[in-house]
Image (spheres, rainbow, N blue to C red):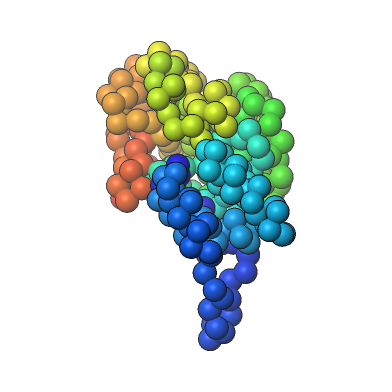
Amino acid sequence: MSSSPTDPTAGPGRRAEGSPAPPGPPEGLVSRLRAVGCVFAEEEAELLLAAAPDPGALAALVERRVAGEPLERLLGWVDFCGVRLELDPGVFVPRQRTRVLVDRALPVLRSARAQGLRPVLVDLCCGCGAVGVALATLVGPVEVHAVDLDAAAVRCARRNVSRIGGQVHQGDLFAPLPQRLAGGVDVVVANAPYVPTQEIRFMPPEARLYEPSIALDGGQDGLDVARRIVAGVRDWLTLTGALLVETGRRQVEALLAAAARAGLVAEVVTADEVDGIAVLAHLRGRRNATPG
């Protein structure tokens, strides 16, 4: 079960300061969620209570959660970096560790904004559009182009990304992007699938059974998609642009090597508080300052 639920403070029903606290969720509900491995059982119970219009609906939601269905899928939304995003069934649930992409892209985008520019951001393998929307919300006006191959993800992302005036393209990585962006992208972020194929069967059921394999399966060593991203990014970045690709700890060295073969200068960046890790790459010889 999820170990980091959607932020309950982003949900409905927050009480006004000074008003009496409402009663907590029934202990029986909390105990049932805790018994199946929900680490934040009380918070999840509160969210399910807020989402259910009546006791019958609550019972149905609880049964689905106990069976392993992701909390965010039941709620229809997810909180990512303080931004609430719509989430449809069958769409990858953004993980909190993906905040590493947001944290490390912020300085690059803010540097471009400080020069009076409207930065261009490309969010590859965008899922519901979480990274692009979070960055545009934090930075201010940003030209966002989000891309995903999966039709369900694209439909969901279009509703989220439209809120910040961005565009969503369906297709394979860079292929559907407007050609006018070539050489003009300040940041490319990618939460590409990086689970090795043979390890998917060991994933928790809420991912393995309810999320699309296209968002999880990274091939034999988990880097099939990431290698294609680092190989193709040079045609799209500005001279001072940056690429950020989330990855796993065991794959870092192989991804750094792939970036070097592609003529990029790369380093490992982390967000230890959420166990996030990514490779940050620049065009050789023209590197942005990206303070930690």
Rendered view: 215 above or below 262: below
Q: Residue furthest bottom?
A: 18
Image: 8 above or below 97 = below
Residue 59 vs residue 263, the one in the foreground: 59
Picture coordinates of residue 250 (x, y %)?
28, 26
Q: Is residue 137 left or right of residue 220?
A: right
Vertical position of residue 27 compared to residue 3: above or below? below
Q: How far across and down, in percent of the image, does residue 133 sit?
A: 59, 48
Extreme front residue here? Answer: 28
| Residue that appears at 55% across and 83% down | 20
Q: Give the residue drawn at x 56%, y 75%.
A: 22
Residue 175 appears left or right of 241 = right
- Residue 61 pos. (x, y %): 63, 48
Q: In the figure, residue 243 lies in which quadrant?
A: top left
Most foreground residue, 223 or 28: 28
Which residue is at 67% across, 40% downward?
88
